Amino acid sequence: MKYLRAIFVLALFCGFSSLALADDIDFHMSVLDPPQQLNYTSIDNTDPFAVSFSACPQIIKATACFTGFNDTNTTFTSLSLVFDNSTNPKDPSDFINFLNGQTPTCDTTPALSLFGSSSCSLNEAETQYLLSFSGGSGIAPGQFFFIAETGPTAAAFGTGTGVVGITPEPDSLLLFATGVMMAGLFFFRQGWMKVSNRRI
């Protein structure tokens, strides 16, 4: 079964990379369920974490990769990435080693995509890329996730920043709401009893 999954991911990335490389002024990024455990960054949801791309394993036909691990007990329901817009003033057409303000594409269509929607853009000052993923199944507790980029080299992105978001489970929200209502009822009764005692 693992081999079948690896073959599927290989085919997926072959199509993904050949489509992306046809456009030399665009980089493509996806957040996927990885086919194998790789060197990874352990992530909790308390602090931003550094995102540095490196070469992909041979089975993955993408330019640069990053592997993270959800080291919490909650699902990451969103992932936001920020990268500086690296530029080469001597050669603005150098889209392989520098980002040079090219248009980003965040792809959530692959079958192994962990998120269902995305918003990716270069800010108005053209200094930073803001790449946000949300929806879909998210990144479950104890799950590896894989950011794959096709286009420029890993060095073009430098070290970016990642932030994950969580949405409290409905049970937790219900428990919190019930607690607030009970506390409100308790204080209301205390106040009512004081008013009643004063009348007597």
Image: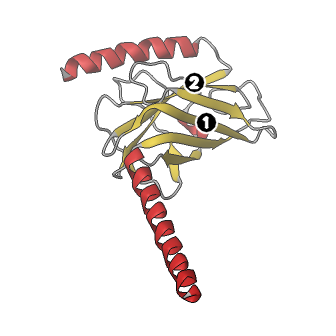
Whole-percent x and y of residue 132? 59, 36
Q: Which of 6 and 123 is in front in this view?
A: 123
**For residue 128, what is the image quadrant?**
top right
At horizontal 35% and vertical 40% (from top left) the residue drawn is 140
Task: Classify mark 2: residues with Cα within 10 Å, few (<14), some (14-19) or many (20+).
Answer: many
Whole-percent x and y of residue 47? 51, 58
Can residue 99 be seen by looking at this rendering?
Answer: no
At horizontal 76% and vertical 29% (from top left) the residue drawn is 91
- Marks 1 and 2 sit apart, C-alpha to C-alpha, by 15 Å
Whole-percent x and y of residue 5? 26, 20
Do tag 1 and tag 2 residues touch (Cβ < 8 Å)?
A: no
Identify whether 83 is placed above or below 16: below
Can residue 196 be seen by looking at this rendering?
Answer: yes
Q: Mark 2 points at which residue?
A: 151
Query: Residue 68 has which mark?
Result: none
At numbered mark 1, what does the secondary structure look like: helix, strand or loop?
A: strand
Name the residue type under label 2: Gly
Q: Name the residue under label 1.
A: 131
In terms of sequence position, does the residue under pointer 1 or pointer 2 come before the other?
Answer: 1
**For residue 106, what is the image quadrant?**
top right
Q: Which of 45 and 26 is in front in this view?
A: 45
At horizontal 54% and vertical 23% (from top left) the residue drawn is 107
